[in-house]
Image (cartoon, helix red, strand yellow):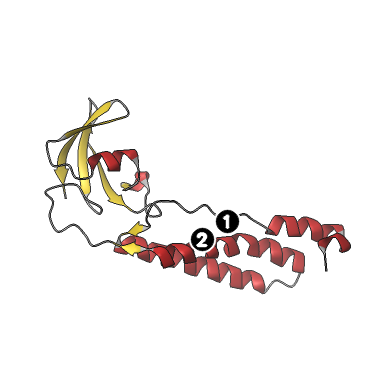
Amino acid sequence: MSVAFTKEESSETAAETLLPDRPISEHPNLVTLRGLKLLQAELDAARSAYDAANAIEDVNERRRQQAVPLRDSRYFAERVRSAQMQPDPETHDVVAFGSTVTYARDDNPPQTYRIVGEDEADPKQGAISFASPVARALMGKAVGDVVEVNEQDLEILSIA
């Protein structure tokens, strides 16, 4: 039956439950082993939240509570499906996906980041996406190399 023929509250609820899909990056879905495990944990959590919402008796409240977990389940299922697990770098000669890089930026104290997949990236936790401007500039470079990012020079101090 069309929402137009149901009570007003149901039409409002239907609009609330039709959430747009989360955007998926155009970059390859490169992941570390940890990143793949995090994606799977997020998928499991979204599915559990959806299942819990399924137990709600009130149909309008059930739809509201299912909306976010359903959208997240679709997103994380696609990210797990498309994940391309990358092994840790075999050497630390040059910056690569999975490397931990310490660099100095002009007169600022050194910064250390691990280069990871987009879903795993969290700069506050020391992880940046391989698709970020800093990571793209550092990839393939060695200790002592200087790269320019946003009109600032970054000198690579170490690679681990």
Q: Nearer the viewer, residue 32 or 27?
A: 27
Q: Nearer the viewer, residue 15 or 26?
A: 26
- Residue at image x 82%, y 62%? 3
Classify the position of the N terminus by image quarter: bottom right
Amino acid found under the numbered disc labelled 1: Asp
User: Badge 1 is on which residue?
Assistant: 21
Q: Is residue 155 above or below residue 69?
A: above
Q: Is residue 85 above or below residue 105?
A: below
Amino acid found under the numbered disc labelled 2: Tyr
Q: Quadrant of residue 109?
A: top left
Q: SS for tag 2?
A: helix
User: Badge 2 is on which residue?
Assistant: 75
Q: Using residue 134 as the reference point, say whether residue 79 is left or right of it.
A: right
Q: SS for tag 1?
A: loop
Mark 1 → mark 2, Cα distance in angstroms: 7 Å
Picture coordinates of residue 122 (x, y %)? 37, 48
Crowd class of label 1 (few under 14; some 14 to 19; many from 20; radius 10 Å): few
- Residue at image x 19%, y 47%? 95
Picture coordinates of residue 32 (x, y %)? 30, 60
Picture coordinates of residue 156 (x, y %)? 17, 38
- Whichever of labels 1 and 2 marks the residue nearer the N terminus, that label is 1
Question: Number of marks in the image?
Answer: 2
Marks 1,2: beta carbons within 8 A: yes
Picture coordinates of residue 27 (x, y %)? 39, 51
